[in-house]
Image: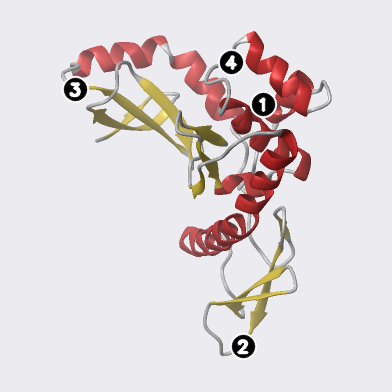
Amino acid sequence: MIKHYEEIGEIDIRPNPKAKSIVVRYRDGIFRLTYPIGLRQKDIDLAILRLRKRLIAMKENAPKSHQFMPSNDFQTFSFTTRIIEKEKTQFSLIFKEGILYIVCPSGSDYTDQNLQERIKNAITLVMRNEAKRLFPDWIRNLAKKNGFEVTSVKINNSQSRWGSCSSQKNINLSLYCMLLPQHLIELVMLHELCHTVEMNHSERFWSLLDKVTNGRSKELTAELKKFKTNF
């Protein structure tokens, strides 16, 4: 259910059978809260009251979404998105020489949220395809260069984690890594490769990541944590 709270705004509240505690995230102008099965609504309301200041700060500090329109190109790692208008045409895509042309009818209203979502979904689709094209060979080359072994590489749509690695050496990379600069994409890849050896963040893990990043593991990780996409 969606419930409105004064000063905070709307919160989409949903039970999660796997949840062990209340978790709140903010995305696309709305908070999403998950809670363990069996928790009473009054307990959820009390938790939100305790978190009020933190939630307000989360909302104020959230990166603003990019406004897609003809005057604003949008850059990803491997391609640029350019919106063009044509008369007597329908919404369509043209991907050519590293540029994704999104063709919209002349006079389109770019304040229309439905059009913004349609453009965003089109870019996401191309980002996924580009990530599938580029990332597996890239990370396998890094693995070979640094003496790691990888079982599989898959692309997912996680917006909460750049990457993950299982104990079977299966690596998942988020398609949203396409929004990072090259050196931070490589950091994410090396981070997950190190997890094929060390499945935690122990001193041994950081020592290994230091080795493959020329001693810059903490510096690059701090840069990654500060990086905010506006997609």
Q: Which residue is mark 1?
A: 225
Residue type, mark 3 in image: Ile
Please indicate, yes or no, whether residue 161 appears anywhere in the rendered image: no
Question: In terms of secondary structure, where does tag 1 sit?
Answer: helix
Residue type, mark 4 in image: His
Which mark is nearer the camera, 2 or 4? 4
Which mark is nearer the camera, 4 or 1? 4
Tell me which corner region of the image, top left, top right, bottom left or bottom right, holds residue 80: bottom right
Residue 87: mark in rendering: 2
Q: Residues within 10 Å of mark 2 (few under 14, many from 20)?
A: few
x, y (%) of residue 121? 50, 60
x, y (%) of residue 37? 19, 22
Please indicate, yes or no, whether residue 4 appears anywhere in the rendered image: yes
Is residue 40 shown above or below 150? above
Marks 3/1: CA–CA distance: 32 Å
Name the residue at 64% across, 29% down: 191
Marks 3/4: CA–CA distance: 31 Å
Q: Depth check: 13 or 98 in front?
A: 98
Question: Does residue 163 appear left or right of residue 10 in this picture?
Answer: right
Residue type, mark 2 in image: Glu
Tell me which corner region of the image, top left, top right, bottom left or bottom right, holds residue 98: bottom right
Q: Which residue is mark 4?
A: 201
Q: Depth check: 38 or 212 in front?
A: 212
Q: Which residue is mark 3?
A: 37
Residue type, mark 1 in image: Lys
Question: Does residue 153 appear left or right of residue 140 in this picture?
Answer: left
Which mark is nearer the camera, 3 or 2? 3
Q: Residues within 10 Å of mark 3 (few under 14, many from 20)?
A: some
Q: Depth check: 3 or 135 in front?
A: 135
